[in-house]
């Protein structure tokens, strides 16, 4: 009798374990979406100092939610009324370094302010990333630029790549809700929905963090630029087309023929973003050179 009860208990426990293990697969089958592993890595202090030592750049820090201090890099313009470009990077083990390169490529010889911050858990910013924290941090980064640099929202342009589309759209929605819409939003190879996991092993037994930009879109005003590669191997070109369709007339869609996911290294994509910023800037802040 005791053996029968033990066997039944073991069977019941096995059923529970099996159902738990099967849950991620069932959820992914019901709601298919791209899945990636977080690519965060520590940034050595010497490497951070080297980035901040590049001409015109300085270290920056802001206190986000839960007392977490995010590391960043800022390059100020020489004239107060120039545009500010805030870059929201994708899932990148070298987030600040890549963000700095992208911003410098966009700027060229223009007198623009440039900003990039590392998300929680990236480049030695403390904490652990999750969707609600990333959305809040996106809004906090924008507030830091507006308050710290005392610039008008219409002079601030948000540029995002891949996962960075999530905090960028959260920041744009936040500003619009406050009656202070930003000058423009440019999304390069942005996600619509994506699942981020801590490790391949963890993904077998549990769902990761789901980032979904669709709830953010309703209150994001024009102008929005969407740039996507026709051969995006990570998200697929349909992602960009879907995002453009959801935004409707608020968005301008540019498809780069033959381009893959890494649009941060694509001259045509960067050129489209640069044009968006210039076209959306106030007339007095369009100057290219340093006066």
Image: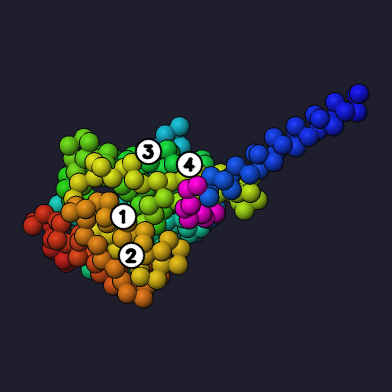
Query: Which residue does the numbered mark 2 point to in the structure image?
Result: 228
What crowding class fits label 4: few (fewer than 14 Cα within 10 Å), some (14-19), or many (20 or more)?
A: some
Q: Secondary structure at mark 2?
A: strand
Residue 89 is at least partly visible in this image: no
For marks 4 and 3, the one nearer the N-term is: 4
Residues under labels 1 and 2: Cα distance?
10 Å
Q: Nearer the viewer, mark 2 or mark 4?
A: 2
**Residue 145 screen position, x and y as percent:** 27, 45
Q: Are marks 1 and 3 in contact (CB under 8 Å)?
A: no
Q: Quadrant of residue 77?
A: bottom left
For the point 28% across and 59% down, which residue is it?
A: 226
Residues under labels 2 and 4: Cα distance?
25 Å
Query: Which residue does the numbered mark 1 point to in the structure image?
Result: 243
* Left or right: 42 in relation to 9: left
Q: Are marks 1 and 2 in contact (CB under 8 Å)?
A: yes
Q: Secondary structure at mark 4?
A: loop
Q: Are marks 2 and 3 in contact (CB under 8 Å)?
A: no
What crowding class fits label 3: few (fewer than 14 Cα within 10 Å), some (14-19), or many (20 or more)?
A: some
Quarter of the image for the N terminus: give it: top right
For marks 2 and 4, the one nearer the N-term is: 4
Q: Quadrant of residue 264?
A: bottom left
Q: Nearer the viewer, residue 90 or 209?
A: 209
Q: Secondary structure at mark 1?
A: helix
Residues under labels 4 and 1: Cα distance?
22 Å
Magenta region: 30-38
Residues under labels 1 and 3: Cα distance?
21 Å
Q: Nearer the viewer, residue 57 or 266?
A: 266
- Residue 35: in magenta span: yes
Q: Nearer the viewer, mark 1 or mark 2?
A: 1
For the point 20% across and 46% down, which residue is it?
A: 221
Query: Which residue does the numbered mark 3 point to in the structure image?
Result: 136
């Amino acid at each position: 009798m005791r053996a029968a009860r033990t066997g039944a208990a073991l069977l019941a426990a096995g059923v529970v374990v099996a159902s738990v293990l099967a849950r991620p697969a069932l959820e992914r089958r019901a709601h298919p979406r791209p899945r990636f592993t977080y690519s965060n890595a520590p940034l050595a202090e010497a490497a951070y100092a080297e980035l901040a030592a590049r001409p015109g750049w300085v270290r920056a820090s802001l206190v986000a939610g839960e007392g977490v201090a995010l590391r960043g890099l800022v390059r100020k313009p020489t004239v107060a009324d120039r545009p500010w470009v805030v870059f929201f990077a994708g899932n990148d083990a070298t987030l600040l370094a890549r963000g700095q390169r992208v911003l410098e490529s966009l700027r060229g010889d223009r007198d623009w302010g440039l900003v990039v911050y590392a998300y929680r858990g990236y480049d030695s910013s403390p904490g652990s990333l999750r969707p609600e924290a990333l959305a809040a941090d996106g809004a906090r980064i924008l507030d830091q630029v507006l308050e710290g640099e005392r610039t008008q929202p219409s002079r601030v342009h948000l540029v995002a790549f891949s996962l960075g589309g999530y905090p960028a759209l959260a920041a744009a929605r936040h500003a619009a809700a406050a009656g202070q819409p930003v000058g423009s939003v440019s999304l390069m190879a942005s996600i619509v929905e994506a699942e981020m996991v801590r490790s391949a092993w963890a993904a077998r037994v549990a769902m990761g963090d789901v980032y979904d930009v669709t709830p953010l879109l309703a209150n994001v005003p024009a102008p929005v630029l969407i740039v996507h590669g026709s051969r995006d191997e990570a998200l697929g070109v349909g992602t960009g087309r879907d995002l453009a369709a959801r935004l409707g007339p608020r968005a301008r869609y540019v498809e780069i023929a033959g381009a893959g996911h890494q649009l941060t290294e694509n001259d045509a994509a960067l050129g489209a973003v640069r044009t968006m910023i210039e076209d959306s800037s106030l007339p007095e802040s369009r100057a290219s050179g340093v006066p």
